[in-house]
Amino acid sequence: MDPHGPTDAAGDADLLAWLRLVYSPGIGPVGVRRVLQACGTPQQVFGCAPARLQRLLPAAAAAALRGPPGPDLGALLARAPAWLAEPGHHLITLADARYPQRLLHIPDPPPLLWACGDTRLLQRPRMLAMVGTRNPTAQGLRDAFAFAHALAQQGVTVVSGLARGVDAQAHRGALEAGRDGGRTLAVLGTGCDRVYPAAHRQLACDISRDGLLVSEFALGLGARAEHFPRRNRIISGLSAGVLVTEAALHSGSLITARLAADQGRDVLALPGSIHNPTARGCHRLLRDGARLVESVHDVLDELGWQAQAPRPGDAAPAAAGAAMPRGLLEHMGSEPIDFDQLLARSGRPAAWLQQQLLELELDGYVARLPGGRLQRIERG
């Protein structure tokens, strides 16, 4: 089978064959690729002699392919065509030209991707995973939003997992940057018709409208603990690199970072205070060879992406930023200040303020202190 071919899973027979093959028990992504490489298309797999299937698969998996589908698989086969008939709903197979090229080169690419939204995002060259703790500090939340917002304005598609904390803020920051910049893509640990956590239902709706939701899990499947490590390999596999903004030592984000390193992706991390337990995972990554980044420009440099000129929609904040640093620095005063105090003093939107602070840090006018406080730097 040619994984770059133009096969479309819309035909009922082809669709049902793909679903039966992928979701029959005991096969898994590696087994699916093995039988496709040996037999051809899914329909040809089901025409293979039993003895040949038994040489390619464990006995139980080969038997499952030869027998009738179980109740769960039968329900999926009955439901999938109607779901796919809805606008913006897609099923992308390994044989589909829309299948993301980066994913083809990981050890166990998902044979199918269910998707809601704009599938063109899967082919974008600038894709960066942003992950972190589900229980970030206030500073961690602000950093995730600000980095995602600024990266999206640089044409980067921010990839994350729709989890609480850093993931959600990364998605929100990218969405806030607007549709003409980068976009955001959420990889789900459930079926594409389910949202976990339920509190992120509106966020998922926003992403499906202005970005993309993807999942390898069958429709109707809820969250299970074993789903999330599998989801994480897709988050890293889609991306040129992974940025960890805040993570404890036992955070699932470190699993994503290790998967990224194994897949040959760049691993980047933000440093934090030595007194912050949710920074220790980032410090571990940095000791193990991750690249330390302190600004969006650091991220672009590490990934070899050239900075883009501001878009017309960004001109007003940028122009204000050129005139405002002195006023913003005056709001800061000479003593350390935290973000919320500066937000109240400046009277400007939080996203704008985060972007200005990143630029001032890059230019050496502001330093970030332990505990998330900010310090104005006097320059001659």
Image: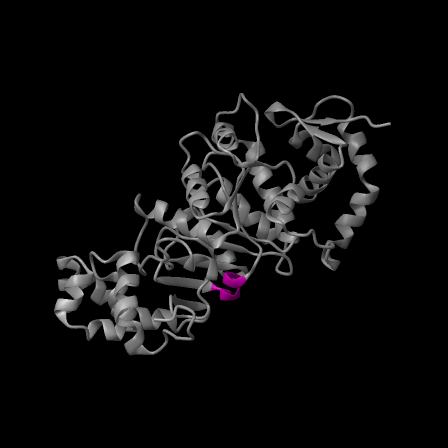
Give the image quarter of residue 370.
Answer: top right
Q: Quadrant of the N terminus?
A: bottom left
Q: Is residue 9 above or below residue 129?
A: below
Q: Nearer the viewer, residue 206 or 212?
A: 212
Q: Nearer the viewer, residue 331 or 5?
A: 5
Q: Is residue 157 above or below residue 44?
A: above
Q: Is residue 68 visible?
A: no
Which residue is at 42% across, 63% downward?
115
Q: In this rendering, would 64 be left or right of 361?
A: left
Q: Which residue is at the far right? A: 380
Examine the structure image and report whether residue 204 is included in the region drawn in magenta: no
Which residue is at 57% across, 24% downward?
273
Q: Is residue 227 visible?
A: yes
Q: Residue 259: give x, y in percent of width and height.
A: 41, 44
Range of the magenta residues? 117-123
Q: Residue 365: give x, y in percent of width and height.
A: 77, 32
Q: Residue 72: give x, y in percent of width and height.
A: 21, 61
Q: How many marks?
A: 0
Q: Nearer the viewer, residue 157 or 50?
A: 50
Q: Quadrant of the C terminus?
A: top right
Q: Is residue 95 above or below residue 178?
A: below
